[in-house]
Image (cartoon, grey):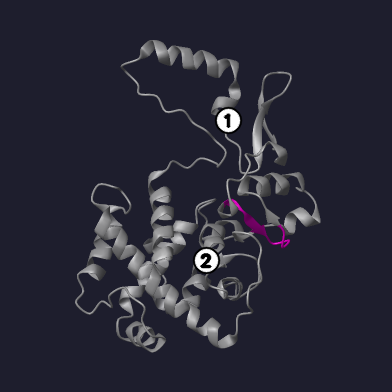
Amino acid sequence: MRVWIVFVLCLAGHAMAAPETEVGANPVQIEVGEFDEAIEVVEDVAAENPCLNHHCKKGKVCEVDESNTPMCVCQDPSTCPAAEGEFEHVCGTDNKTYDSSCHFFATKCTLEGTKKGHKLHLDYIGPCKYIEPCMDTELNEFPLRMRDWLKNVLVTLYERDEDNNLLTEKQKLRVKKIYENEKRLQAGDHSLDLLAHDFEKNYNMYIFPVHWQFGQLDQHPVDGYLTHTELSPLRAPLIPMEHCTTRFFEQCDADNDKYIALEEWAACFGIKEQDVDKDLII
């Protein structure tokens, strides 16, 4: 549980505080007003190298063509930094261990337009290993723990927020109601029976956390649907710890169209249809 909360604290902090740029960009931030001459030099360099302000998605790097126009091309996997340890390894859906996410996305880029490349995704963080099959009874238990975890992640963010901008003012007001509720089940390792009982008795406390997580993931683009790529920041670290993760998210895609709509996501966590509210993910 503690590992999950630390992970989402990092995820939420990044999502709420970082500007929306494609991974691979390396923007240089300059304080304006005090060093005018330095700014002029940077502008000259940018004019000579258009790639400084040209962002490419994962697996691609910027190069200029003959007319000095920036363009994104697939990165050569051999140019990726060497992994410093196994903790940087990732497992692809091809059941192959890649030295790092850089190596994985560079490889995936070289396969663009092919059937293999279309099917290849980042599966989970860490070297490939045997993942136990998820039994039906275990699958039914998964949302019990996940709901409780989401609620406690939000409470933790609220407690640590202050001026960190981890939550918007509107989100803080919603979480405050959960935080101050005397009936709130405190964080801890609880039995499944207790988690099920708490969800039944304190159902309203779980509505916003489920919506909040959907909003955190629906980023590229913000369209009310979750793709495999958008789910990766959540599912990739969880799979090694929760072997029902993959099957759970597959089940959420009720119509099997490769997209998880908000209504499907909410249903997976037991949120009633009449309580699904798109305004809660903003």
Identify the magenta region. Answer: 88-96
Residue 190, image x and y in percent? 36, 81
Residue 191, image x and y in percent? 38, 85
**Image-quadrant location for residue 66:** top right
Residue 278 visible (yes or no): no
Q: Residue drawn at (51%, 84%), measured in percent from left and top?
A: 140
> Looking at the image, which residue sits at the far top?
37
Q: Secondary structure at mark 2?
A: helix
Using the image, tell me which numbered label, if any, was put on residue 215.
none
For disc 2, the neighbor class at 10 Å (few under 14, some 14 to 19, many from 20) is: some
Q: Amino acid at mark 2?
A: Leu
Q: Could you tell me which quadrant the N terminus lies in?
A: bottom left
> Looking at the image, which residue sits at the far front?
85
Q: Earlier in the sequence, mark 1 or mark 2?
A: 1
Q: Is residue 105 left or right of residue 226?
A: right
Using the image, tell me which numbered label, if any, was put on residue 54.
1
Q: Is residue 24 left or right of residue 154?
A: right
In front here: 242 or 277? Answer: 242
Residue, disc 2: 238
